[in-house]
Amino acid sequence: VLLATGAVVALRQFSAFVPPQVGESRRAALLGAVVAANVATSPADAYQPTVSFFGLSPSGVTVSDAYSQNNADNPYDQFSDGKDAIYQKDEAIVAKRKAQLEESFRRIEKVPPLIKTKQSSEITMEMTRQVAFLGKNIEFFSQPVGSPNWELGRSVIAEMGDLGVAIKKKDWDRAQRDYDGFQAKAKEW
C-alpha cells in the first residue's frame, strides 16, 4: 500500500493538462466554433424515423411495423410484383419445384401407418427430410401473395405444422385428425 501511494504522489507531478493558447490562436478557435455552430443544420431538420409502441406513437402517426415504412419494390425479391424484377421464373425452376412438391406429398403418404404404430421418430425423420421444402414450394405455386390461393396454401402449411405439434406431443388421435385435415386442405389447394 505504501509503495502504491508513493507511485501516485510521484506521478501527480506530471500533468496531462495542456495550458490554453493565448493571443491569435484563441480568437481563431472561438471564431471557428461560432462558424461551425451556425453552419450545422438543426436536429429538427434531420430525418426522424417513426417510432411507435404497440402501434401508438407520440406524434399521433400509427405505425405497426417498421418494415412497412419501406414500401419500395425490391427487384431482388421473388415475391415482388415482377416488373423490373431480377428474379424471373423459368421452366427449370418451376420443374424443380414441382418435382420437390410431388416428392413431399409422396413422403407424407407414409405418415398414417406410422401414426397407427406410434413411431414419432420415424414420422419426424420423414417430415424433416424432403417435406421441409413443402411450405416454400406451396408458397411458390400459390402466388400472388394475398390471393385466395395464397391463403389456401398457407392453411395447408398450417395444417402440416399442427400435425408436427401433435407428433411431438405424441397425441396420436389429434395427429390422425390433423393428418386428415392436412389431406383435405391439400386436395382443395
Image (cartoon, grey):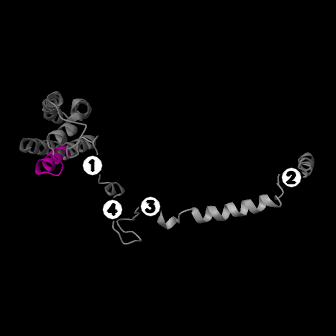
- Up the image or down, 105 lies above or below 143; here it is above
Read off the residue under disc 3.
47
- Work out whether residue 140 or residue 46 is closer to the camera in this orientation and state it: 46
- Mark in front: 1 vs 4: 1
The overriding secondary structure of the stretch rendered in magenta is: helix
Looking at marks 4 and 3 on the same chain, the residue that comes earlier in the sequence is marked by 3
The answer to whether mark 4 and mark 2 are in CB contact below 8 A is: no
Amino acid found under the numbered disc labelled 4 = Ser
Please, what is the three-letter code of the amino acid marked with disc 3? Tyr
For disc 4, the marked residue is 64
Q: Name the residue under label 1.
A: 73
Circle 4 or circle 2, nearest the eye: 2
Q: Position of residue 87 (x, y in %)?
A: 24, 36
User: Under tag 1, what secondary structure?
Assistant: loop
Of mark 2 and mark 1, the one earlier in the sequence is 2
Which circle marks residue 15 in the picture?
Answer: 2
Q: Which mark is first along the chain, 3 or 1?
A: 3
Q: Give the range drawn in magenta.
A: 144-157
Spot the residue most to the front.
24
